[in-house]
Amino acid sequence: MKTLALGLATVVLALACGSAAAQKKYDPGASDTEIRIGQTMAYSGAASIYGEVGKTQAAYFRMVNDQGGVNGRKLNFISLDDGYSPPKTVEGVRRLVEQDQVLLLYGMFGTATNSAVHRYVNAKKIPHLLLLTGASKWNDPQRNPWSMSFYPDYASEARVYARHILEQKPNAKIGILYQNDDYGRDYLRGFKEGLGARAKSMIVAEASYEVSDPTVDSQIVQLRGAGADVLVSFSTAKAAIQTLRRVHDTGWKPTHYLAQGAALIGAVFNPAGPEKAVGVISTAYSKDPNDTQWENDPAFREWLAFMKKYRPEADLRLGSHVYAYSSARLMVDILRASGDNLTRENVLRQASSIKAVQLPMFLPGVVVSSSPDDYRLIKSLQPVVFDGKRWNRLGEFVSIF
């Protein structure tokens, strides 16, 4: 009788194990022990300051592995330097997909670099998730369903600045500096849409620059010479530093709006001289590590402990670490929600069905959500102004639809 009972138990256990095994589904890059994630990042070149994001994301995944991984699987994060060069991005992504066989691509930086590969990854049906770029093209689930940004939509952010100018300086003479690529042109388009019929009369000058340009001095001279009393900068970090210095040193005192990707206290304002950034207006959605109001905030203290343990060499004043921490946290949440169904299709399904998640280092009230028809994760922004030390709120949150 005992032998029969043992035999039945063995059959039941075997059926249970068989059922559990049957429930597990894997695409290339996933197994019982590992989830392989790929990325290209600007660790060198003109945009190398954004490489700090990749380093902190790698650190976050190391922490998750130390804590047991995701559903028992270790994260193998392969992050390659593309120098913010689209041809190198293509080379790196092909290697990640075809040789390293990653399950997904995550957190890649740059509009031009991601644009260079987005047709390839969509044709291959590789999840291309939580990109560090806010170009409108990443919210196109009908034509490019495998690509999704973590960043606020550039055009929507630009409309926030346009609305603010119309409310606060309706007779402004506006000069615009923008990067001459998809990044800058997306902002420019959204800004003009936000001004509507007033755009033609209010914008007195536009000046573009190339990422490879050594300076933006001549563009600043051009905009000032046009009589602008409002300067709108849709630039990245290097050009933003140069702009702050040039505007200050020439004695020009326009109201200055700066795209949030370059409105960084640690990475832009401090190198330029924080006194040169006093009065700069931008937008925010996450907690500023330079703001003392968060010192006793439990989420901030948890972030700080993580940084001190896993990135002890990092400059804690850089807001890019907060961005990286939040982005990596959401990526892990998506993988946890995928459970044992680690197919590319299911990972994408989880990423596109996020229900109002409050990330710990986001400002209270800013939640991330997504749906199969709307990939924009962040849908509200807080206008802010810099006082020489920290950001201060300007009015209420603004929805960015």
Image (tube, grey):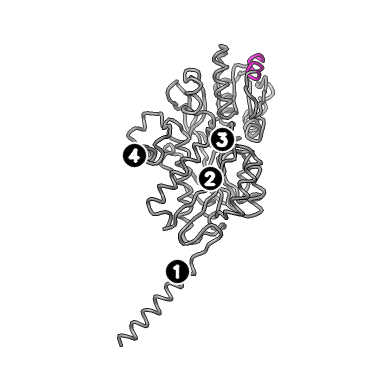
Residue at the disc numbered 4: 298
Residue at the disc numbered 1: 20
Q: Disc 3 residue type?
A: Ser
N-terminal of the two: label 2 or label 1?
Answer: 1
Q: How much space separates mark 4 and mark 1, taking CA atoms?
A: 38 Å
Disc 4 crowd rating (10 Å Cα; few below 14, some 14-19, many 20+) is few
Q: Main secondary structure of the magenta part?
A: helix
Could you say whether the residue bearing mark 1 is in a helix, strand or loop?
Answer: helix
Q: Nearer the viewer, residue 159 or 15?
A: 15
Identity of the residue drawn at 40% across and 47% down: 63
Residue at the disc numbered 3: 44
| Residue 187 visible, this orientation | yes
Give coordinates of residue 311: x percent, y percent: 41, 38
N-terminal of the two: label 4 or label 1?
Answer: 1
| Residue 401 visible, this orientation | no
Q: How much space separates mark 1 and mark 3, taking CA atoms?
A: 45 Å
Left or right of 244 in this view: 301: left
Residue at the disc numbered 2: 79
